[in-house]
Every structure is written in structure tokens, then in C-alpha cells.
Amino acid sequence: MKNIISYVLSAIATVYTLWYMHFAPPHKNSGALSKIGLEHPVLFAIWGVLTFCALALSIVIAYKRYLSTKIYIPLLTLSGIGMILTLTNDFDFDKKAEYYLHCAGSLTFSAVTGITIFLLFLLNYKKGRMFKAFTYITAGILITDFVCLLIFKETGLIEALPVFAGYILLAITNLRREKIELTR
């Protein structure tokens, strides 16, 4: 049942994010999700809550299914605090303190969530090819996103692509059936 809720929530969050991104060109700095949030703060808050809940639920399901560690709990707590800071502080440079808190929150949410997903795959690395591939894919996405952020600054695409990748990789992981060995 939790899996179905997770898939539905991820699908809703994906559709909502795509719809939300229509307010500005996603490939430009003006299309950054936080910049759109300055004009549409309620919609931005809905996006943030949906995104965090969809990713967190999928992460919890995957960790409980594949690992005995509870490292995801403090990591998701930090990620949640980051999202709260992002949503409760304006991305307005004229309000310097709020701007820096917003940026710190956004970076915390993104980095800690990405690291949590990467750790899931890394800690399961020896369990199969899928985990090996997802470890490399996740690392590649995190590094590429960071480099693109440094080069192009913040855009909607740079923000959304890792989130979409998280939805997809976690859904595949949680949909995966265990191999059953038949014995005579």
C-alpha cells in the first residue's frame, strides 16, 4: 500500500512540477523554481511540500526494504529543515538575511536528499547490477548538476532534473522484484 501511495505521490509531484515550471522559461535563470515562487508563493509551497513528501516516502520505503540502517532518518530530517527554510524565506536579494536562508535551505535540501539517495545505492552496491548502475547514475547526476549550477547559475531545469531522476530511480528500485532462487 505504501508503494502505491509513493508512486501516486511521485506522479502527482512530477505533473505538478512540470505544470509549475510553465510560468517561466525553464532553461533561463528567470525559470528557477524559487524565482517563480516570488510571484506564486502558495504554488511554490505546494511544490516544495509535494516534492519533499514524494522523495522522502520513496526513500523510507527503499531503505526499509533493502537496508537495516536508519541513517535516512537524520538525513531526511536535515533535508526537511532545508525545505522548510526554502519555503519560509523569500528568494529576494533585497532581503539579504531571507535570501541567504532560502539559498542555504535549498542547497541543504538538494544536497542532503541527493546524498541520501546516493548512499542507498552505494550501500546496496554489491547486491546487483541495478544498484551498481544507479550508484554511478546518481553520482553522475549530482556532479553534473553541481557543475551546471556553477556554470549556468540556477535554472528550472538544473533544479528539476535531479528531482525527476530521484522519482524515477526510487520508483524502479521500489518496484523491483527480488530474485527467487528455485531449489529442488
Image (tube, rainbow, N blue to C red):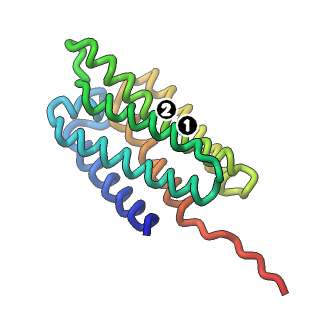
Q: Is residue 89 left or right of residue 161?
A: left
Crowding at mark 2 (Cα within 10 Å: few <14, some 14-19, many 20+):
some
> Under tag 2, what secondary structure?
helix
Q: Which residue sits furthest bottom?
A: 184
Q: Is disc 1 in contact with disc 2, using a CB cutoff of under 8 Å?
A: yes
Residue designated by label 1: 115
- 10 in relation to 45, above or below: below
- The picture places residue 9, in percent across and down from the top left corner, at 35, 58
Figure label count: 2
Q: Which residue is mark 2?
A: 111
Q: Amino acid at mark 1?
A: Ile
> Which quarter of the image is occupied by the C terminus?
bottom right
| Residue 123 percent across, percent down from the top left | 68, 46
> Which residue is pictured at 67% across the width and 44% down the height?
122
Q: Is 10 situated left or right of 75 in this image?
A: left
Indicate whether 137 appears above or below 94.
below
Q: Give whichever of 155, 13 is nearer the camera.
A: 13
